[in-house]
Image: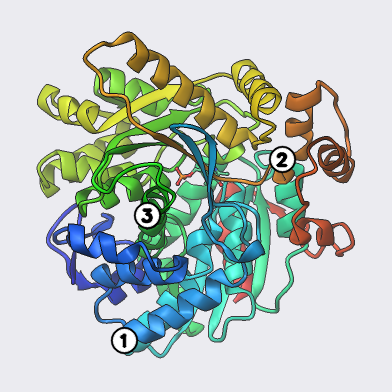
Amino acid sequence: MVFISTRGEEKVTGAQAIVQGIAKDGGLFVPEKFPAVSAEELESMLSMDYPERAAFVLHKYLDEYDREELLAALKKAYAQFEDGDAAPLVRVENGMYMLELFHGPTCAFKDMALTVLPYLLRKGCDLCGIKENILILVATSGDTGKAALEGFKDAEGIKIMVFYPDDGVSKMQKLQMCTQEGENVNVVAVRGNFDDCQTGVKKIFASDDCKAKLKEKGYLLSSANSINFGRLAPQICYYFSAYCDLVTSDQIRMGDKVNFTVPTGNFGNILAGYYAKRMGLPIGTLVCASNKNNVLTDFWAKGVYDTKRPFHKTMSPSMDILVSSNLERLIFELSGRDASLTKTRMQALSASGKYSVRPEELKAYKAEFYAGCTNEADTVDCMYEFFEEYGYPMDTHTGVAMHVAQQYEEMIEKDPAAEKRPMVVVSTASPYKFPQDVLYALTGNDVKDSFKGIKRINLLTAMKVPESLKAIRYKPIRFKQVTSPEKMFDEVLKFV
Ligand SMILES: *Cc1c(COP(=O)(O)O)cnc(C)c1O
Protein backbone atom coordinates (compact mmCIF):
# COMPACT_ATOMS: atom_id res chain seq x y z
CA MET A 1 0.00 0.00 0.00
CA VAL A 2 1.15 3.51 -0.83
CA PHE A 3 1.26 6.28 1.80
CA ILE A 4 1.15 9.99 1.09
CA SER A 5 1.92 13.09 3.14
CA THR A 6 -0.94 15.26 4.41
CA ARG A 7 1.00 18.30 3.21
CA GLY A 8 2.23 17.42 -0.23
CA GLU A 9 3.34 14.97 -2.79
CA GLU A 10 5.67 12.64 -0.91
CA LYS A 11 4.78 9.01 -1.59
CA VAL A 12 6.26 6.13 0.39
CA THR A 13 5.63 2.50 1.30
CA GLY A 14 4.18 1.51 4.67
CA ALA A 15 7.61 0.44 5.89
CA GLN A 16 9.09 3.79 4.87
CA ALA A 17 6.26 5.66 6.55
CA ILE A 18 6.98 3.84 9.81
CA VAL A 19 10.76 4.20 9.65
CA GLN A 20 10.60 7.88 8.72
CA GLY A 21 7.83 8.68 11.23
CA ILE A 22 7.02 12.04 9.68
CA ALA A 23 7.08 13.23 6.05
CA LYS A 24 9.91 15.45 4.80
CA ASP A 25 7.48 18.34 4.34
CA GLY A 26 6.44 18.08 8.01
CA GLY A 27 3.19 16.33 7.13
CA LEU A 28 1.88 13.03 8.47
CA PHE A 29 1.68 9.87 6.41
CA VAL A 30 -1.78 8.63 5.51
CA PRO A 31 -2.85 5.70 3.32
CA GLU A 32 -3.43 6.70 -0.29
CA LYS A 33 -6.83 5.15 0.11
CA PHE A 34 -8.59 3.32 2.91
CA PRO A 35 -8.50 -0.46 2.51
CA ALA A 36 -11.99 -1.96 2.78
CA VAL A 37 -13.10 -4.73 5.11
CA SER A 38 -16.15 -6.39 3.59
CA ALA A 39 -19.11 -7.77 5.52
CA GLU A 40 -17.88 -11.31 4.79
CA GLU A 41 -14.42 -10.47 6.07
CA LEU A 42 -15.86 -8.97 9.23
CA GLU A 43 -17.90 -12.13 9.66
CA SER A 44 -14.73 -14.19 9.30
CA MET A 45 -13.07 -12.18 12.06
CA LEU A 46 -15.68 -13.27 14.62
CA SER A 47 -13.97 -16.58 15.32
CA MET A 48 -10.46 -15.13 15.50
CA ASP A 49 -8.54 -14.28 18.68
CA TYR A 50 -7.16 -10.78 19.25
CA PRO A 51 -3.75 -11.22 17.55
CA GLU A 52 -5.42 -12.81 14.52
CA ARG A 53 -7.93 -9.98 14.22
CA ALA A 54 -5.12 -7.46 14.56
CA ALA A 55 -3.00 -9.20 11.92
CA PHE A 56 -5.97 -9.20 9.57
CA VAL A 57 -6.55 -5.46 9.89
CA LEU A 58 -2.86 -4.47 9.97
CA HIS A 59 -1.99 -6.47 6.91
CA LYS A 60 -4.53 -4.50 4.91
CA TYR A 61 -2.27 -1.46 5.36
CA LEU A 62 1.13 -3.11 5.67
CA ASP A 63 0.87 -5.60 2.83
CA GLU A 64 4.62 -5.72 2.19
CA TYR A 65 5.10 -7.27 5.63
CA ASP A 66 4.96 -11.05 5.66
CA ARG A 67 1.54 -12.06 6.98
CA GLU A 68 2.70 -15.04 9.06
CA GLU A 69 5.62 -13.16 10.55
CA LEU A 70 3.34 -10.24 11.40
CA LEU A 71 0.93 -12.59 13.14
CA ALA A 72 3.77 -14.17 15.10
CA ALA A 73 4.97 -10.71 16.21
CA LEU A 74 1.46 -9.74 17.30
CA LYS A 75 1.01 -12.99 19.23
CA LYS A 76 4.28 -12.34 21.02
CA ALA A 77 3.38 -8.71 21.78
CA TYR A 78 -0.06 -9.45 23.14
CA ALA A 79 1.12 -12.46 25.15
CA GLN A 80 2.63 -9.86 27.52
CA PHE A 81 -0.87 -8.71 28.48
CA GLU A 82 -2.31 -9.98 31.75
CA ASP A 83 -4.97 -12.69 31.60
CA GLY A 84 -4.40 -13.50 27.96
CA ASP A 85 -6.78 -10.96 26.41
CA ALA A 86 -5.33 -7.73 25.07
CA ALA A 87 -8.61 -5.86 24.62
CA PRO A 88 -11.46 -7.32 26.67
CA LEU A 89 -14.91 -5.81 26.31
CA VAL A 90 -16.80 -5.56 29.60
CA ARG A 91 -20.57 -5.19 29.71
CA VAL A 92 -21.69 -2.71 32.34
CA GLU A 93 -25.37 -2.82 31.51
CA ASN A 94 -27.45 -3.22 28.38
CA GLY A 95 -26.12 -0.88 25.74
CA MET A 96 -23.10 0.28 27.80
CA TYR A 97 -19.69 -1.37 27.49
CA MET A 98 -16.09 -0.69 28.50
CA LEU A 99 -13.27 -1.57 26.13
CA GLU A 100 -10.37 -2.20 28.49
CA LEU A 101 -7.06 -1.42 26.83
CA PHE A 102 -4.90 -1.28 29.94
CA HIS A 103 -3.85 -4.86 30.58
CA GLY A 104 -0.42 -4.45 28.96
CA PRO A 105 3.02 -4.11 30.56
CA THR A 106 2.61 -0.41 31.48
CA CYS A 107 -1.11 -0.39 32.30
CA ALA A 108 -2.21 2.15 29.66
CA PHE A 109 -3.59 1.80 26.16
CA LYS A 110 -0.30 2.95 24.61
CA ASP A 111 0.85 -0.66 25.08
CA MET A 112 -1.58 -1.74 22.35
CA ALA A 113 0.70 -0.15 19.76
CA LEU A 114 4.04 0.17 21.50
CA THR A 115 4.43 -3.54 22.13
CA VAL A 116 4.12 -3.99 18.34
CA LEU A 117 6.02 -0.96 17.03
CA PRO A 118 9.54 -2.35 17.65
CA TYR A 119 8.77 -5.23 15.28
CA LEU A 120 7.16 -2.95 12.69
CA LEU A 121 10.15 -0.63 12.83
CA ARG A 122 12.93 -3.21 12.75
CA LYS A 123 11.25 -5.12 9.94
CA GLY A 124 10.58 -1.81 8.22
CA CYS A 125 14.31 -1.02 8.29
CA ASP A 126 15.02 -4.43 6.71
CA LEU A 127 12.42 -3.83 4.02
CA CYS A 128 13.94 -0.41 3.27
CA GLY A 129 17.52 -1.71 3.31
CA ILE A 130 18.54 0.57 6.19
CA LYS A 131 21.76 -0.41 7.95
CA GLU A 132 22.22 2.44 10.46
CA ASN A 133 21.32 2.27 14.12
CA ILE A 134 18.03 3.86 15.05
CA LEU A 135 17.51 6.55 17.67
CA ILE A 136 13.95 6.90 18.91
CA LEU A 137 13.06 10.26 20.43
CA VAL A 138 9.83 10.51 22.39
CA ALA A 139 8.01 13.42 23.96
CA THR A 140 5.52 12.15 26.49
CA SER A 141 2.70 13.43 28.64
CA GLY A 142 3.26 10.35 30.77
CA ASP A 143 2.01 7.11 29.31
CA THR A 144 3.70 6.99 25.90
CA GLY A 145 7.14 7.36 27.43
CA LYS A 146 6.88 4.35 29.67
CA ALA A 147 5.20 2.19 27.05
CA ALA A 148 7.86 3.10 24.47
CA LEU A 149 10.71 2.43 26.90
CA GLU A 150 9.25 -0.93 27.79
CA GLY A 151 8.60 -1.80 24.15
CA PHE A 152 12.07 -0.87 22.93
CA LYS A 153 14.23 -1.84 25.93
CA ASP A 154 17.28 -3.83 24.80
CA ALA A 155 16.06 -3.89 21.18
CA GLU A 156 19.06 -4.55 18.98
CA GLY A 157 20.42 -1.60 16.98
CA ILE A 158 17.95 0.80 18.60
CA LYS A 159 18.39 3.43 21.31
CA ILE A 160 15.49 5.25 22.89
CA MET A 161 15.34 8.58 24.68
CA VAL A 162 12.26 9.98 26.42
CA PHE A 163 11.52 13.58 27.42
CA TYR A 164 8.72 14.32 29.86
CA PRO A 165 7.45 17.55 31.50
CA ASP A 166 9.00 17.70 34.96
CA ASP A 167 5.79 18.77 36.70
CA GLY A 168 3.36 17.41 34.16
CA VAL A 169 3.11 13.69 34.89
CA SER A 170 1.71 11.72 37.81
CA LYS A 171 3.99 10.34 40.52
CA MET A 172 3.40 6.82 39.34
CA GLN A 173 4.14 7.71 35.72
CA LYS A 174 7.40 9.37 36.78
CA LEU A 175 8.37 6.40 38.91
CA GLN A 176 7.59 4.01 36.07
CA MET A 177 9.89 5.91 33.71
CA CYS A 178 12.73 6.70 36.12
CA THR A 179 13.09 3.06 37.17
CA GLN A 180 13.16 1.82 33.57
CA GLU A 181 15.54 -1.06 32.92
CA GLY A 182 17.52 -1.67 29.74
CA GLU A 183 20.95 -0.70 28.43
CA ASN A 184 19.70 1.34 25.46
CA VAL A 185 17.33 3.73 27.27
CA ASN A 186 17.52 7.28 28.62
CA VAL A 187 14.92 9.43 30.37
CA VAL A 188 15.16 13.20 30.88
CA ALA A 189 12.74 15.63 32.52
CA VAL A 190 12.16 18.99 30.82
CA ARG A 191 11.31 22.24 32.61
CA GLY A 192 8.07 23.00 30.79
CA ASN A 193 4.79 21.36 29.81
CA PHE A 194 4.07 18.58 27.33
CA ASP A 195 3.78 20.97 24.40
CA ASP A 196 7.31 22.25 25.18
CA CYS A 197 8.60 18.67 25.09
CA GLN A 198 6.76 17.90 21.87
CA THR A 199 7.93 21.11 20.20
CA GLY A 200 11.52 20.39 21.28
CA VAL A 201 11.43 16.92 19.75
CA LYS A 202 9.76 18.18 16.58
CA LYS A 203 12.52 20.80 16.21
CA ILE A 204 15.20 18.12 16.35
CA PHE A 205 13.35 16.11 13.72
CA ALA A 206 13.06 19.18 11.48
CA SER A 207 16.72 20.19 11.81
CA ASP A 208 19.16 19.05 9.12
CA ASP A 209 21.99 20.08 11.39
CA CYS A 210 20.82 17.81 14.22
CA LYS A 211 20.29 14.94 11.80
CA ALA A 212 23.76 15.35 10.30
CA LYS A 213 25.35 15.30 13.74
CA LEU A 214 23.51 12.09 14.59
CA LYS A 215 24.41 10.54 11.26
CA GLU A 216 28.08 11.16 12.03
CA LYS A 217 27.59 9.00 15.08
CA GLY A 218 25.86 6.32 13.02
CA TYR A 219 22.27 7.06 14.05
CA LEU A 220 19.10 7.64 12.12
CA LEU A 221 16.20 9.38 13.86
CA SER A 222 12.81 7.79 14.23
CA SER A 223 9.76 8.54 16.31
CA ALA A 224 7.51 6.45 18.49
CA ASN A 225 5.03 9.29 18.99
CA SER A 226 1.47 8.83 17.96
CA ILE A 227 2.00 10.64 14.66
CA ASN A 228 3.90 7.57 13.47
CA PHE A 229 1.62 5.40 11.35
CA GLY A 230 3.10 2.40 13.15
CA ARG A 231 1.41 3.71 16.31
CA LEU A 232 -1.89 4.45 14.67
CA ALA A 233 -2.32 1.18 12.77
CA PRO A 234 -2.39 -1.26 15.72
CA GLN A 235 -5.01 0.98 17.35
CA ILE A 236 -7.44 0.52 14.49
CA CYS A 237 -7.63 -3.18 15.32
CA TYR A 238 -9.31 -2.95 18.71
CA TYR A 239 -12.30 -1.14 17.25
CA PHE A 240 -12.83 -4.14 15.00
CA SER A 241 -12.26 -6.54 17.85
CA ALA A 242 -14.72 -4.75 20.17
CA TYR A 243 -17.33 -4.85 17.43
CA CYS A 244 -16.76 -8.57 16.90
CA ASP A 245 -17.07 -9.19 20.64
CA LEU A 246 -20.40 -7.35 20.70
CA VAL A 247 -21.67 -9.61 17.93
CA THR A 248 -20.36 -12.88 19.38
CA SER A 249 -21.83 -12.08 22.82
CA ASP A 250 -25.23 -11.38 21.21
CA GLN A 251 -25.28 -7.75 22.28
CA ILE A 252 -25.81 -6.56 18.70
CA ARG A 253 -26.51 -8.04 15.29
CA MET A 254 -23.91 -7.88 12.56
CA GLY A 255 -24.31 -4.57 10.75
CA ASP A 256 -25.80 -2.64 13.71
CA LYS A 257 -24.09 0.67 14.34
CA VAL A 258 -22.17 1.23 17.56
CA ASN A 259 -20.89 4.46 19.13
CA PHE A 260 -17.52 4.84 20.83
CA THR A 261 -16.42 7.42 23.39
CA VAL A 262 -12.70 8.06 23.54
CA PRO A 263 -10.75 10.09 26.12
CA THR A 264 -8.70 12.26 23.82
CA GLY A 265 -5.34 14.02 23.97
CA ASN A 266 -3.23 13.85 20.84
CA PHE A 267 -6.22 12.56 18.85
CA GLY A 268 -4.50 9.25 18.02
CA ASN A 269 -6.89 6.81 19.64
CA ILE A 270 -10.10 8.35 18.31
CA LEU A 271 -8.57 8.85 14.86
CA ALA A 272 -7.95 5.10 14.74
CA GLY A 273 -11.69 4.69 15.35
CA TYR A 274 -12.38 6.98 12.41
CA TYR A 275 -10.03 4.91 10.23
CA ALA A 276 -11.90 1.76 11.27
CA LYS A 277 -15.14 3.44 10.22
CA ARG A 278 -13.66 4.44 6.87
CA MET A 279 -12.64 0.81 6.35
CA GLY A 280 -16.27 -0.18 6.68
CA LEU A 281 -16.80 -0.96 10.36
CA PRO A 282 -20.37 0.00 11.34
CA ILE A 283 -19.54 2.85 13.71
CA GLY A 284 -22.13 5.57 14.37
CA THR A 285 -20.82 8.54 16.33
CA LEU A 286 -17.31 8.88 17.68
CA VAL A 287 -17.50 10.87 20.90
CA CYS A 288 -14.37 12.93 21.53
CA ALA A 289 -13.98 13.52 25.26
CA SER A 290 -11.70 16.24 26.65
CA ASN A 291 -10.87 17.45 30.13
CA LYS A 292 -10.54 21.16 31.03
CA ASN A 293 -8.10 21.51 28.12
CA ASN A 294 -11.05 21.67 25.76
CA VAL A 295 -9.46 22.94 22.54
CA LEU A 296 -11.14 20.16 20.59
CA THR A 297 -14.60 20.79 22.06
CA ASP A 298 -14.36 24.44 21.01
CA PHE A 299 -13.08 23.43 17.59
CA TRP A 300 -16.15 21.29 17.01
CA ALA A 301 -18.41 24.09 18.22
CA LYS A 302 -16.87 26.96 16.24
CA GLY A 303 -14.67 25.54 13.52
CA VAL A 304 -11.69 27.42 14.95
CA TYR A 305 -8.74 25.52 16.39
CA ASP A 306 -7.30 27.98 18.87
CA THR A 307 -4.40 27.02 21.13
CA LYS A 308 -4.00 30.51 22.53
CA ARG A 309 -5.47 29.76 25.92
CA PRO A 310 -4.35 28.81 29.40
CA PHE A 311 -2.93 25.34 29.86
CA HIS A 312 -4.56 23.42 32.71
CA LYS A 313 -2.84 20.70 34.68
CA THR A 314 -5.45 18.08 35.49
CA MET A 315 -5.66 14.64 37.05
CA SER A 316 -5.87 13.20 33.52
CA PRO A 317 -2.38 14.33 32.46
CA SER A 318 -2.25 12.25 29.28
CA MET A 319 -5.02 14.48 27.95
CA ASP A 320 -3.40 17.79 28.96
CA ILE A 321 -2.59 18.74 25.40
CA LEU A 322 -3.32 21.87 23.41
CA VAL A 323 -1.84 20.83 20.07
CA SER A 324 -3.37 17.49 19.09
CA SER A 325 -0.92 16.35 16.43
CA ASN A 326 -3.05 13.63 14.90
CA LEU A 327 -5.88 16.03 14.15
CA GLU A 328 -3.90 16.95 11.04
CA ARG A 329 -4.88 13.63 9.51
CA LEU A 330 -8.57 14.37 10.04
CA ILE A 331 -8.19 17.95 8.77
CA PHE A 332 -6.71 16.45 5.64
CA GLU A 333 -9.56 13.94 5.18
CA LEU A 334 -12.39 16.36 5.86
CA SER A 335 -10.93 19.07 3.63
CA GLY A 336 -11.43 16.60 0.77
CA ARG A 337 -7.77 15.55 1.01
CA ASP A 338 -6.56 19.03 0.13
CA ALA A 339 -2.84 18.87 0.93
CA SER A 340 -2.06 22.50 0.20
CA LEU A 341 -4.93 23.70 2.39
CA THR A 342 -3.78 21.35 5.15
CA LYS A 343 -0.28 22.74 4.84
CA THR A 344 -1.54 26.34 5.02
CA ARG A 345 -3.54 25.56 8.14
CA MET A 346 -0.66 23.82 9.88
CA GLN A 347 1.62 26.73 9.03
CA ALA A 348 -0.97 29.09 10.54
CA LEU A 349 -1.05 26.87 13.63
CA SER A 350 2.69 27.14 14.18
CA ALA A 351 2.82 30.85 13.27
CA SER A 352 -0.22 32.16 15.16
CA GLY A 353 -1.46 29.24 17.23
CA LYS A 354 -4.73 28.86 15.35
CA TYR A 355 -6.58 28.10 12.14
CA SER A 356 -10.16 27.68 11.04
CA VAL A 357 -12.12 25.37 8.76
CA ARG A 358 -14.95 26.18 6.33
CA PRO A 359 -18.61 25.86 7.39
CA GLU A 360 -19.21 22.91 5.07
CA GLU A 361 -16.23 21.12 6.59
CA LEU A 362 -17.49 21.80 10.09
CA LYS A 363 -20.72 20.10 9.10
CA ALA A 364 -18.76 16.98 8.19
CA TYR A 365 -16.96 17.08 11.54
CA LYS A 366 -20.29 17.22 13.33
CA ALA A 367 -21.73 14.39 11.28
CA GLU A 368 -18.95 11.98 12.29
CA PHE A 369 -18.09 13.14 15.81
CA TYR A 370 -19.57 14.64 18.93
CA ALA A 371 -17.09 16.59 21.05
CA GLY A 372 -17.58 17.34 24.72
CA CYS A 373 -15.55 18.24 27.78
CA THR A 374 -15.75 18.07 31.52
CA ASN A 375 -14.11 19.52 34.61
CA GLU A 376 -12.32 17.94 37.54
CA ALA A 377 -15.22 17.98 39.98
CA ASP A 378 -17.68 16.38 37.55
CA THR A 379 -15.12 13.72 36.63
CA VAL A 380 -14.64 12.83 40.30
CA ASP A 381 -18.43 12.67 40.83
CA CYS A 382 -18.86 10.50 37.78
CA MET A 383 -16.14 8.05 38.88
CA TYR A 384 -17.69 7.86 42.35
CA GLU A 385 -21.26 7.39 41.15
CA PHE A 386 -20.25 4.80 38.60
CA PHE A 387 -18.45 2.79 41.23
CA GLU A 388 -21.41 3.05 43.59
CA GLU A 389 -23.83 1.93 40.91
CA TYR A 390 -21.87 -0.75 39.07
CA GLY A 391 -18.91 -1.55 41.33
CA TYR A 392 -16.69 -0.63 38.40
CA PRO A 393 -13.61 1.46 39.25
CA MET A 394 -12.13 3.50 36.43
CA ASP A 395 -9.08 5.68 36.02
CA THR A 396 -9.25 9.47 35.73
CA HIS A 397 -8.98 9.55 31.90
CA THR A 398 -11.74 7.01 31.54
CA GLY A 399 -13.70 9.09 34.07
CA VAL A 400 -13.54 12.05 31.67
CA ALA A 401 -14.74 9.82 28.85
CA MET A 402 -17.59 8.41 30.92
CA HIS A 403 -18.84 11.83 31.92
CA VAL A 404 -18.83 13.06 28.33
CA ALA A 405 -20.50 9.81 27.20
CA GLN A 406 -23.26 10.52 29.71
CA GLN A 407 -23.64 14.08 28.36
CA TYR A 408 -23.96 12.62 24.89
CA GLU A 409 -26.55 10.04 25.97
CA GLU A 410 -28.60 12.76 27.69
CA MET A 411 -28.58 14.78 24.52
CA ILE A 412 -29.73 11.76 22.51
CA GLU A 413 -32.50 11.03 25.04
CA LYS A 414 -33.88 14.53 24.53
CA ASP A 415 -33.82 14.33 20.75
CA PRO A 416 -36.74 12.26 19.44
CA ALA A 417 -35.17 12.10 15.98
CA ALA A 418 -31.86 10.69 17.24
CA GLU A 419 -31.05 7.03 16.94
CA LYS A 420 -30.15 5.24 20.18
CA ARG A 421 -27.14 2.98 19.78
CA PRO A 422 -24.93 0.87 22.02
CA MET A 423 -22.04 2.83 23.52
CA VAL A 424 -18.53 1.54 24.04
CA VAL A 425 -16.42 3.69 26.35
CA VAL A 426 -12.74 3.19 25.67
CA SER A 427 -10.96 2.64 28.97
CA THR A 428 -7.38 3.78 28.54
CA ALA A 429 -5.63 3.20 31.85
CA SER A 430 -5.73 1.01 34.91
CA PRO A 431 -7.14 2.80 37.98
CA TYR A 432 -3.96 1.69 39.72
CA LYS A 433 -1.90 3.88 37.47
CA PHE A 434 -3.39 7.02 39.07
CA PRO A 435 -3.93 5.70 42.59
CA GLN A 436 -4.10 8.96 44.57
CA ASP A 437 -6.68 10.58 42.32
CA VAL A 438 -8.72 7.42 41.95
CA LEU A 439 -8.76 6.84 45.70
CA TYR A 440 -9.82 10.44 46.21
CA ALA A 441 -12.64 10.04 43.70
CA LEU A 442 -13.90 6.83 45.27
CA THR A 443 -13.57 7.73 48.96
CA GLY A 444 -12.74 11.44 49.34
CA ASN A 445 -9.48 10.43 51.06
CA ASP A 446 -6.08 11.82 50.20
CA VAL A 447 -2.95 9.72 50.49
CA LYS A 448 0.57 10.96 49.78
CA ASP A 449 2.06 7.61 48.91
CA SER A 450 1.10 5.96 45.60
CA PHE A 451 1.55 2.46 46.95
CA LYS A 452 -0.67 3.18 49.93
CA GLY A 453 -3.23 4.37 47.41
CA ILE A 454 -2.91 1.14 45.48
CA LYS A 455 -3.44 -0.91 48.61
CA ARG A 456 -6.51 1.08 49.63
CA ILE A 457 -8.08 0.81 46.18
CA ASN A 458 -7.42 -2.90 46.20
CA LEU A 459 -9.16 -3.31 49.57
CA LEU A 460 -12.09 -1.24 48.36
CA THR A 461 -12.59 -2.73 44.91
CA ALA A 462 -10.99 -6.18 45.09
CA MET A 463 -9.66 -5.46 41.59
CA LYS A 464 -6.36 -7.23 40.93
CA VAL A 465 -3.23 -5.06 41.18
CA PRO A 466 -1.11 -5.33 38.00
CA GLU A 467 2.18 -7.14 38.65
CA SER A 468 4.20 -4.50 36.81
CA LEU A 469 3.04 -1.73 39.18
CA LYS A 470 3.69 -3.82 42.28
CA ALA A 471 7.24 -4.45 41.14
CA ILE A 472 8.18 -0.76 40.72
CA ARG A 473 8.20 -0.17 44.44
CA TYR A 474 11.45 -2.08 44.83
CA LYS A 475 13.27 -0.87 41.76
CA PRO A 476 16.13 1.65 41.97
CA ILE A 477 15.71 5.13 40.42
CA ARG A 478 18.04 5.21 37.40
CA PHE A 479 17.21 8.60 35.84
CA LYS A 480 17.18 11.96 37.62
CA GLN A 481 18.25 14.43 34.96
CA VAL A 482 16.34 17.67 34.35
CA THR A 483 16.99 19.99 31.41
CA SER A 484 15.53 23.07 29.71
CA PRO A 485 13.67 22.91 26.38
CA GLU A 486 16.62 24.63 24.65
CA LYS A 487 19.11 22.00 25.79
CA MET A 488 17.24 18.89 24.71
CA PHE A 489 19.48 18.18 21.74
CA ASP A 490 22.63 18.50 23.90
CA GLU A 491 21.23 15.70 26.03
CA VAL A 492 20.62 13.62 22.91
CA LEU A 493 24.23 14.04 21.78
CA LYS A 494 25.50 13.04 25.20
CA PHE A 495 23.45 9.87 25.01
CA VAL A 496 24.45 8.50 21.60
C1 LIG B 1 -2.48 8.82 25.70
C2 LIG B 1 -3.67 8.67 26.56
C3 LIG B 1 -4.88 9.25 26.22
C4 LIG B 1 -5.05 10.12 24.99
O1 LIG B 1 -4.93 9.38 23.81
P1 LIG B 1 -4.63 10.12 22.43
O2 LIG B 1 -4.40 9.04 21.46
O3 LIG B 1 -3.41 10.95 22.66
O4 LIG B 1 -5.82 10.96 22.12
C5 LIG B 1 -5.97 9.02 27.05
N1 LIG B 1 -5.85 8.28 28.16
C6 LIG B 1 -4.69 7.72 28.53
C7 LIG B 1 -4.62 6.94 29.79
C8 LIG B 1 -3.56 7.88 27.75
O5 LIG B 1 -2.40 7.32 28.11
Q: Seen in the image, is 75 located left or right of residue 227?
A: right
At a point 88% along the width and 34% down the height, the residue shown is: 448
Q: CA distance from mark 3 to mark 1?
A: 32 Å
Number of other residues with Cα within 10 Å of mark 2, as a class: few under 14, some 14 to 19, many 20 or more: many
**Residue nearest the observer in this picture, 281 or 351:** 281
- How far across and how far down the image is residue 88, in percent? 53, 53
Name which quarter of the figure residue 222 lies in. Answer: bottom left
Residue on which disc 2 sits? 434
Q: Nearer the viewer, mark 3 or mark 1?
A: 3
Residue on which disc 1 sits? 127
Mark found first going from the N terminus, 1 or 2: 1
Residue on which disc 3 sits? 244
- How far across and how far down the image is residue 123, in percent? 39, 83
Q: Nearer the viewer, mark 1 or mark 2?
A: 2
- Does 241 sit above or below residue 387? below
- How far across and how far down the image is residue 87, in percent? 51, 56
